[in-house]
């Protein structure tokens, strides 16, 4: 399959933005053709409110779809090739439905994108059809390109009955590219990763420009990326990676308040995880173990499932001073940051209507707790507070914490309290936290697991189930990092595994109004 950045398939991000600004795609791309080699427009008289009508040439259909998705547009695109016709529905930048002849959903989408020439027009629709597509547009466009390539290859290759056996023995080690402007740090990281026989450092780059070239040559399984670098910094580099040749990216830096917001931005651009750089003052063997574990987990990420954070218009609500009566605990880890923000934007106000609160635990270092709460306040517009000492859980609030920190829930009179107490071991702490929450809220508790969520040894989830609470999984096939969710799904403790679009409805529907 050609890399997603090949001119045949896409347009670089800066050109995307320029095209979106220049063409006013949000306001109505009306008619076009896809069968010529230059760019021109018609001279038809235009009504001031009707948008643009014209001819786009030397542009692929998937280019247009990516522009619409990147600009968070909502439209229906009708595509014609001869007597054949298909439609693609895009809502807020997400492909939700496609229909072609007697097909609907993903297969219809692939059928339409398999047409190399044709014409298109955007049409207005009054209602959105039932959703038949849940995959991200990244995945859909790449899979469509792969299918076209596969078909072209079959047509180009002569039939042969001769079989060829390769004598090469493949290297099954994880292929990692290290990108850091410090030669010393590159050596340290390479030494840490290659101590065992599971990881092969296939290259090291001093800046983003070098990294982009090396990714094309080496096709690594994972890229470890620094934040601040000369020539091309980490932000520009990850944009290029995610558009041109998507692969799992782990950000490595020294955590601090000044960098926190930038790290969150990286996670929203598609980075799977963040890891702090190793420090001389800490146990190097323990650091090595944690880094290797996280790298191996991040490498399993399905980056095609990455979905850009879409912040909906916030519901107007006022947090209550009353103690919450219902609680939702959302656990997320590597790959789960965009999923967390997308969920909480609608979940927090929905729980406020039920006198409920939300506790969100993310798999980042403890120093990110306060910055993440502040970031959620600013980015999403709902009240978010870091968990600190003993805090009353109030209706309509979101409380932010990190995996691995000691947490517990208990009653203080008529008020449920969340506090920073309990064991410091990460796996044991999540079990103790869930057990205490289950005893406190019983059937009025829901635990939601997103990508990469650490659920400990499952004794906490078992306590939730025993107390008639609920455990809900985000559908694993839509998650970036699904492997930590597999043992939970197989445990029999899960009440439902649902699509991202159905999570809030499923959570809210299970709470009885008078419970």
Image: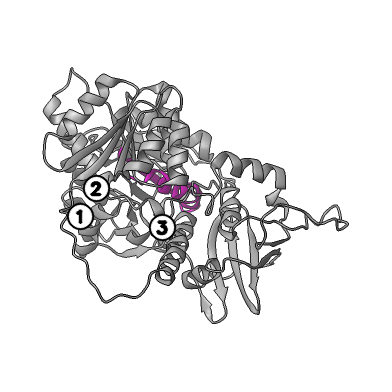
Mark 1 lies on residue:
463
Mark 2 lies on residue:
434
Are circles 2 and 1 on residues that touch, CB within 8 Å?
Answer: yes
Q: Which stretch appears magenta? A: 334-363
> Residue 160: x and y, percent?
30, 75
Instruction: Judge depth for marks 2 and 3 and give the one in front.
Output: 3
Residue at 15% across, 53% down: 169
Q: Secondary structure at mark 1?
A: helix
Sequence-first tag of 2 and 1: 2
> Residue 83: x and y, percent?
65, 79
Q: Give neighbour class at mark 2: few <14, some 14-19, many 20+ (Cα, 10 Å).
A: many
Left or right of 91: which side holds 278?
A: left
Marker disc for residue 1 = 3
The reply to whether residue 272 is in sight is no
By what rule are the colours in the image chosen? one colour
> Residue 54: x and y, percent?
77, 57
Give the CA distance from mark 1 to mark 3: 47 Å
Snapshot quadrant of residue 427:
top left
> Residue 106: x and y, percent?
47, 69
Q: Quarter of the image for the C terminus: give it.
A: bottom left
Q: Give neighbour class at mark 3: few <14, some 14-19, many 20+ (Cα, 10 Å).
A: few
Residue at 35% across, 22% down: 181
């Amino acid at each position: 399959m050609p890399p997603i950045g090949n001119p045949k398939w896409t347009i670089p991000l800066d050109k995307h933005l320029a095209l979106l600004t220049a063409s006013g795609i949000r306001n109505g791309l009306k008619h076009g053709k896809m069968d010529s080699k230059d760019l021109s427009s018609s001279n038809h008289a235009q009504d001031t409110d009707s948008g643009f009508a014209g001819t786009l040439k030397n542009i692929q259909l998937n280019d247009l779809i990516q522009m619409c998705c990147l600009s968070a547009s909502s439209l229906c695109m009708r595509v014609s090739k001869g007597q054949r016709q298909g439609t693609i529905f895009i809502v807020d930048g997400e492909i939700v439905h496609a229909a072609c002849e007697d097909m609907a959903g993903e297969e219809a989408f692939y059928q339409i994108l398999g047409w190399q020439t044709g014409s298109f027009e955007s049409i207005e629709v009054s209602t959105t059809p039932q959703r038949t597509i849940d995959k991200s547009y990244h995945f859909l466009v790449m899979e469509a390109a792969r299918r076209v390539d596969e078909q072209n290859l079959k047509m180009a290759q002569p039939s042969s009955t001769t079989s060829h056996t390769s004598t090469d023995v493949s290297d099954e080690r994880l292929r990692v590219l290290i990108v850091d402007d410090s030669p010393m740090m590159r050596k340290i990281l390479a030494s840490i990763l290659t101590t065992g026989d599971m990881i092969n450092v296939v290259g090291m780059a001093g800046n983003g420009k070098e990294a982009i070239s090396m990714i094309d040559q080496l096709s690594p399984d994972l890229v470890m990326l620094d934040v601040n670098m000369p020539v091309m910094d980490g932000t520009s580099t990850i944009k290029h990676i995610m558009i041109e040749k998507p692969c799992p990216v782990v950000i490595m830096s020294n955590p601090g308040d000044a960098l926190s917001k930038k790290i969150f931005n990286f996670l929203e651009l598609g980075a799977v995880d963040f890891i702090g750089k190793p420090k001389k003052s800490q146990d190097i063997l323990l650091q090595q173990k944690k880094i290797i574990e996280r790298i191996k987990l991040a490498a399993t990420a399905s980056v095609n499932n990455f979905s850009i954070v879409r912040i909906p218009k916030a519901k107007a609500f006022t947090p209550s001073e009353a103690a919450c009566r219902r609680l939702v605990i959302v656990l997320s880890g590597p790959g789960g940051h965009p999923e967390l923000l997308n969920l909480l934007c609608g979940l927090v106000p929905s729980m406020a209507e039920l006198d409920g609160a939300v506790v969100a635990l993310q798999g980042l270092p403890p120093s990110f707790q306060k910055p993440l709460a502040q970031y959620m306040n600013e980015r999403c517009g709902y009240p978010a507070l870091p968990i600190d000492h003993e805090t009353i859980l109030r209706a309509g609030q979101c409380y932010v914490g990190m995996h691995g920190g000691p947490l517990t829930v208990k009653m203080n009179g008529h008020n449920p309290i969340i506090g920073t107490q309990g064991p410091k071991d990460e796996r044991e702490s999540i079990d103790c936290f869930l057990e205490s929450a289950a005893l406190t809220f019983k059937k009025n508790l829901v635990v939601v697991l997103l990508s990469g969520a650490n659920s400990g040894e499952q004794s906490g989830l078992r306590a939730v189930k025993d107390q008639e609470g609920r455990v809900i999984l985000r559908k694993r096939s839509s998650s970036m990092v699904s492997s930590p969710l597999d043992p939970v799904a197989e445990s029999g403790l899960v009440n439902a595994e649902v699509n991202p679009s159905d999570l809030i409805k499923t959570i809210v529907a299970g709470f009885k109004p008078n419970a």
